[in-house]
Image: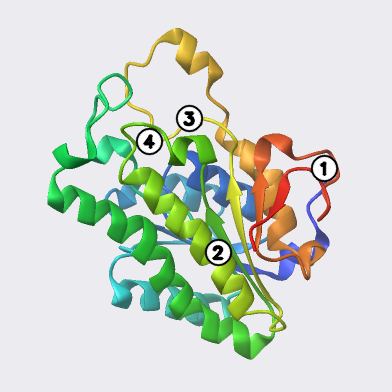
Amino acid sequence: MTNAPADLNERVAIITGAGRGIGRAMAQGLAAAGCRLIVTAARNAEELSALVADFPDRIVALRADVTDASDCACCVDTALARFGRLDILVNNAGRGMRTVSPDFMTEPTKFWQTDVETWRTLIDTNVNGPFLMARAAVPVMLRAGWGRIINISMNYETMRRRGFSPYGPSKAALESQTVIWAQDLAGSGITVNALLPGGATRSGMIPPGVSAAVAAKLLAPDIMVPPLLYLASSCSDGVSGRRFVATLWPAAGEAGWPGAENLS
């Protein structure tokens, strides 16, 4: 979509993991469209300062860990206290294969070689984190009769790639959650969809020192913004339980475009 939907100027969003990469690009896109935002980071909250500086009246930064139910509730409470409402939840915070090994692209780790606590941490962040955030946000959206939950996913090929455990399984679980939540919320005015870039993207999940050839092929994080604006707005009313691939997004997106797969 070339222009931001007008109703986004009235909306309030939470974006988790917004300090860099895809999360930062999505926060910038929503803020530029007129949204007010709560943005979070669990480890490097200072990375959020640039977002706040760019949009001081629209963005509030919080240090929050999505694996902590009280932190998730605090995000929702802060949105209500600062902006009086909550319309959109973007579940972006996650841990990738760099958590397992910095050499995952050249020396894949077999699943039985993965440290147990590392496995639990990644699953806790990528699977339990979106659940805890949605659990905190949905009651507010139900009272309003309108809401958007957008879960950030990845390519099917990457979910199944050798050596990509537990990252691949964690995103497969998130897509299962997406379709189940969409059914649970059917008729409520709240939609739940998955959004993914469609390829490797410049983000903190890519290890430093990749070859120039690989770096040249990485997608820009802002590829996510056009489909995000569609999914976050009233333009997507009734569109739920679908999977959107940003690289397939046309100039004027609609529910029937080729990049929208029905997950149910």
> Crowding at label 4, few (<14), some or many (≥20) Cα neighbours within 10 Å?
some
Q: Nearer the viewer, mark 4 or mark 2?
A: 2
Residue at (50%, 66%) from the top-left corner?
Answer: 177
Q: Is residue 153 above or below residue 239?
A: above
Residue 44 percent location from the top left of the image: 29, 48
Q: Amino acid at mark 2?
A: Thr
Residue at (31%, 37%) from the top-left corner?
Answer: 97
Q: Nearer the viewer, mark 3 or mark 2?
A: 2
Q: In terms of secondary structure, where does tag 3 sit? A: loop
Q: Amino acid at mark 4?
A: Gly
Q: Are marks 4 and 1 in contact (CB under 8 Å)?
A: no
Residue at (57%, 76%) from the top-left corner?
Answer: 83
Q: In terms of secondary structure, where does tag 4 sit? A: loop
Q: Amino acid at mark 3?
A: Arg
Q: Amino acid at mark 1?
A: Thr
Work out whether residue 119 or residue 207 is closer to the camera in this orientation and state it: 119
Q: Which residue is mark 1?
A: 2
Q: Which residue is mark 4?
A: 204
Work out whether residue 70 or residue 36 is closer to the camera in this orientation and state it: 70
The numbered disc on residue 202 is 3
Residue 131 percent location from the top left of the image: 42, 70
Residue 34 percent location from the top left of the image: 69, 59
Q: Are marks 4 and 3 in contact (CB under 8 Å)?
A: no
Picture quadrant of residue 208:
top left
The numbered disc on residue 178 is 2
Spatial separation of the CA atoms under disc 4 and disc 2:
24 Å
Number of dots carrying numbers? 4
